[in-house]
């Protein structure tokens, strides 16, 4: 029995540009945060800053970077408002 892995969502060019612009405010180990995040982490960041959902459920394995992405999104939103 094989397990079917769900297809991960990808960002459009406009969504990716928004994430790139938002992450330009942050550096991790003297490198831009946009360069260090994986594509899946960028998708998580986008959905967190988009703001049209009241609740978002992130199910990912340990050491995936969830806390970092949530912290970056929280800081970005606090800068905006």
Image: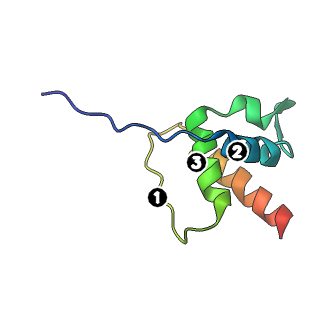
Q: Nearer the viewer, residue 53 or 58?
A: 53
**Rendered image: mark on residue 44:** 3
Cβ atoms under marks 1 and 3 closer than 8 Å: no
Classify 40 as above or below 52.
above
Pointer 2 or 1: first along the chain: 2
> Whole-percent x and y of residue 41?
60, 40
Residue at image point 48% right, 52% down: 58
The residue indicated by pointer 2 is 14
Q: CA distance from mark 1 to mark 3?
A: 10 Å
Mark 2 crowdedness (10 Å alpha carbons): few <14, some 14-19, many ≥20: few
Q: CA distance from mark 2 to mark 1?
A: 23 Å
Residue at the extreme left of the image, as rendered:
1
Q: Is residue 65 visible in this depiction of the protein?
A: no
Q: Is residue 69 visible in this depiction of the protein?
A: yes
Q: Nearer the viewer, mark 2 or mark 1?
A: 2
Residue at image point 51% right, 61% down: 56
Q: CA distance from mark 3 to mark 2?
A: 15 Å
Residue at image point 64% right, 50% down: 46
Element at label 3 = helix
Q: How is the image coloured?
A: rainbow
Element at label 2 = helix
Residue at image point 79% right, 49% down: 22
> Whole-percent x and y of residue 64?
53, 37
The residue indicated by pointer 1 is 57
> Could you tell me which quadrant the C terminus lies in?
bottom right
> Whole-percent x and y of residue 38?
61, 32
Classify 46 as above or below 39.
below
Element at label 1 = loop
Cβ atoms under marks 3 and 2 closer than 8 Å: no
Residue 23 lies left or right of residue 53; in this view the side is: right
């Amino acid at each position: 029995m094989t397990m079917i892995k769900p297809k991960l969502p990808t960002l459009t060019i406009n969504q990716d540009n928004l994430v790139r612009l938002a992450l330009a405010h942050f550096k991790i180990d003297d490198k831009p945060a946009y360069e260090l995040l994986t594509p899946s982490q960028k998708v998580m960041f986008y959905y967190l800053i988009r703001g049209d959902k009241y609740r978002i459920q992130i199910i990912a394995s340990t050491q995936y970077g969830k806390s970092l992405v949530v912290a970056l999104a929280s800081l970005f939103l606090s800068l905006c408002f």
